[in-house]
Amino acid sequence: MRNKVIMMVPVLAILVIGLLGAQARLPMPSGQEAREKIEGAEKFLKKKEPDRALVLLREVVAAEPNYAPAYFLSALACRMKEDPEQALTLLEKALQLDPGLAPAISEAANLLNALAQEKVAQNQPEKGYGYYARIVALPGLQGFNQRLFIEALYNMGISSFQAKNHDQSEDA
């Protein structure tokens, strides 16, 4: 299952980047140099060169630490590098700075959902529950993607039930 999740990562990240270019353009930072680095990082992400993108994005974060889209783009690069935990940390930082950053909400929800499904498939429902709970706690998700919000609530209940039954079966 982990391989399926990881194989989907670059595809999802590229789709998000494509959507950004097509319609939901991220706000640009205030400085010209930072703007150029963001544009360069987006190009590297489109070329599937996450390491090169991360170099530029780290420089943007150093110059403008409150610029949420830099953390979001860094998270996409981490997903390409198959580092979902670092991607989640960066997405959480982006949402802390800008709770309404729709691409970050969407990316965080999709990543958490994939990780939750992976843990449940590995017979670790308590860990799946934790990921589903993090989906439900995402700022603005209920209004942004009500279907995923409701699905996460449902799966929290199922995971909770499975975890209780799993614990009881281990005691027997």
Image (cartoon, helix red, strand yellow):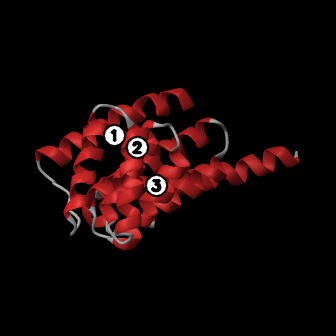
Q: Quadrant of residue 30?
A: bottom left
Classed neighbour count for the residue bearing mark 3: other residues with Cα under 10 Å, few (<14), some (14–19), many (≥20): few
- Under mark 3, the amino acid is Tyr
The disc, 1 or 2, on the residue closer to the chain's N-terminal end is 1
In primary-sequence order, the first of circles 3 and 1 is: 1
Front residue of 71 and 59: 59
In terms of image quadrants, where is residue 28? bottom left
C-alpha separation, residue under disc 2 versus residue under disc 3: 30 Å
Q: CA distance from mark 1 to mark 2?
A: 8 Å
What residue do we see at 63% from left, 53% from top? 161
Q: Is residue 95 left or right of residue 82?
A: left
Toward the front, the furthest residue is 33
- On the image, the x and y values in percent for residue 101 come to 28, 64
Residue corresponding to mark 2? 77
Distance from the alpha carbon under mark 3 to that under mark 1: 26 Å
Please say if 72 is above or below 95.
Answer: above
Amino acid tagged 2: Ala
Query: Which of the two discs, 2 and 3, labels the residue nearer the N terminus?
Result: 2
Is 81 situated above or below 84?
above
Which quadrant would the C terminus be assigned to in this image? top right
Q: Give the structural element (helix, strand or loop) at label 2.
A: helix
User: Is label 3 or label 1 in front?
Assistant: 1
Which label lies toward us, 1 or 2?
2
Q: Is residue 147 visible?
A: yes
Whether residues under marks 1 and 2 lie with C-beta atoms below 8 angstroms apart, the answer is yes
Vertical placement of residue 100 versus 106, above or below: below
Residue carrying label 3? 154
Question: Which element is circle 1 on?
Answer: helix
Left or right, 108 with reference to 172 = left
Q: Residue 26, how many percent across, how many down?
A: 20, 58
Residue under label 1, please give it: 13
Q: Secondary structure at mark 3?
A: helix
